[in-house]
Amino acid sequence: MKIFLDTASLPEIVWAAGAGLIDGVTTNPSLLAQEDSETDPRDHLTEIARSVSGPVGAEVVAVDAEGMYREGRDLAKVADSIIVMVPMLEDGIVATRRLTSEGIRVCTTLVFTPAQALLAAKSGARYVSPFVGRLEDIGQDGVSVVAQTREIFMHYGLECELLAASVRTPLHFIGCARAGADAAAVPPAVLRNMLIHPLTDRGVDQFLHDWSKRIARSRAGV
Ligand code: E4P
């Protein structure tokens, strides 16, 4: 499964890309707003695109079809790797159709039902993003939306990629992987939580302790 780092933080992107852990980056207006306010967001996106090989999601902030189309076209010029993220609104679907018919790759974001995902795929979206954690926030099963969407896409051979978003725990990640998501948008903190295990740390401590005893014995000639 592909992993897209869900952040606009350059140091985190450089770390994860250097470690070979990520296949792209997703951002949203909230994530970009957390970064240095002196830097033009487009320049920041350019830097992100230089730091990772793979798609970089950049979201429109207009909510009308014409505005989303224009912004999407501008964002697509920032770098070849930009995927324009368009919210799952009626106007968003219209804008998506226009953008994709011009060869611009779109990810439909803020998707919460399999029906929305199917409509996004029909409109030409290259990726569709169901938000797992936000569904759980309101007591619904986000992973099951990913699984149902996978099933529907398989029935009809849809080429749209399933990019699970709002993945907030390693369990969400595993659930999405088991459900057959093509990719997951994972925040840096969750990626680090997926890396670590206390038994790994305890095992390393034990090995080092035993090894230092062995060295001490051979130095003492025992
Ligand atoms: C994806 O594109 C979004 O940036 C993200 O996954 C949202 O996650 P959140 O619901 O934890 O804010």
Image (spheres, rainbow, N blue to C red):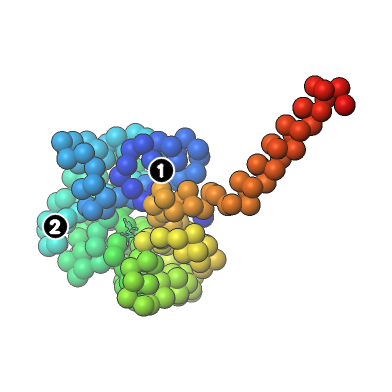
At label 1, the amino acid type is: Gly
Q: Which residue is mark 2?
A: 62
At label 2, the amino acid type is: Ala
| Percent of width and height locating residue 67 | 12, 56
Mark 2 and mark 1: span between their CA atoms? 25 Å
Q: Which mark is on residue 23?
A: none
| Percent of width and height locating residue 188 | 41, 48
- Give the residue furthest to the right: 222
Secondary element under disc 2, as helix, strand or loop, is loop
Mark 2 or mark 1: which comes first in sequence?
1
| Percent of width and height locating residue 81 | 34, 42
Ligand 1 rendered quadrant:
bottom left
- The residue drawn where x is 34% and y is 71% is 137
- Above-or-below relation of 123 to 1: below
Q: Name the foreground residue: 112 vs 214.
A: 214
Q: Which residue is mark 1?
A: 54
- The residue drawn where x is 70% and y is 43% is 206
